Amino acid sequence: MAKEKIVKNILIEELVENYPFSVNYLSKNGIRCIVCGEAIWGTLEEAAQEKGFDDETIEKFVEELNQLNNEFEEHVKKEIKNIDTDESDV
């Protein structure tokens, strides 16, 4: 089952829990507090604004995170299909 689309007002805790790849993505884009262990409360938008990112950049983050999630889900679907195919050969 596909997860809901990532939006800028997603809580950081929810983002990290449901989309673990987001930690690496955000770290590479200058939102590193998630990696260093400092607690972040609030939304993706608030965390990005705190680091000085403008609305356009925040929208880009949301778009790219959703694209990464779609790619991940497609990869998982292919792996499941491969497993199912391998098991049917037995």
Image (spheres, rainbow, N blue to C red):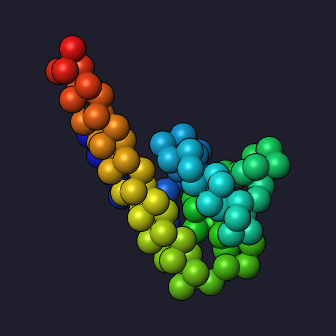
* Residue at screen point 41% across, 64% down: 67
* Residue at screen point 74% across, 68% down: 30
Residue 57 horizontal side relative to residue 1, left or right: right
Residue 4 horizontal side relative to residue 64, left or right: left
In what quadrant of the picture does the N terminus appear?
A: top left
In what quadrant of the picture does the C terminus appear?
A: top left
Closer to us: 39 or 72: 72
Specify the quadrant of the image occupied by residue 49: bottom right
Residue 18, x across and y down, in percent: 48, 42
Which residue lies most toward the top here?
90
Which residue lies most toward the front here?
89
Residue 7, x across and y down, in percent: 43, 63
**Is 53 situated above or below 18?**
below
**Is 33 situated above or below 51?**
above
Residue 89, x across and y down, in percent: 19, 21
Please tell me how many numbered marks the rendered image carries. Answer: 0
**Is 48 situated above or below 53?**
above
Quick check: can you spot residue 38?
no
* Residue at screen point 44% across, 71% down: 63
Residue 61 horizontal side relative to residue 49, left or right: left
Specify the quadrant of the image occupied by residue 44: bottom right
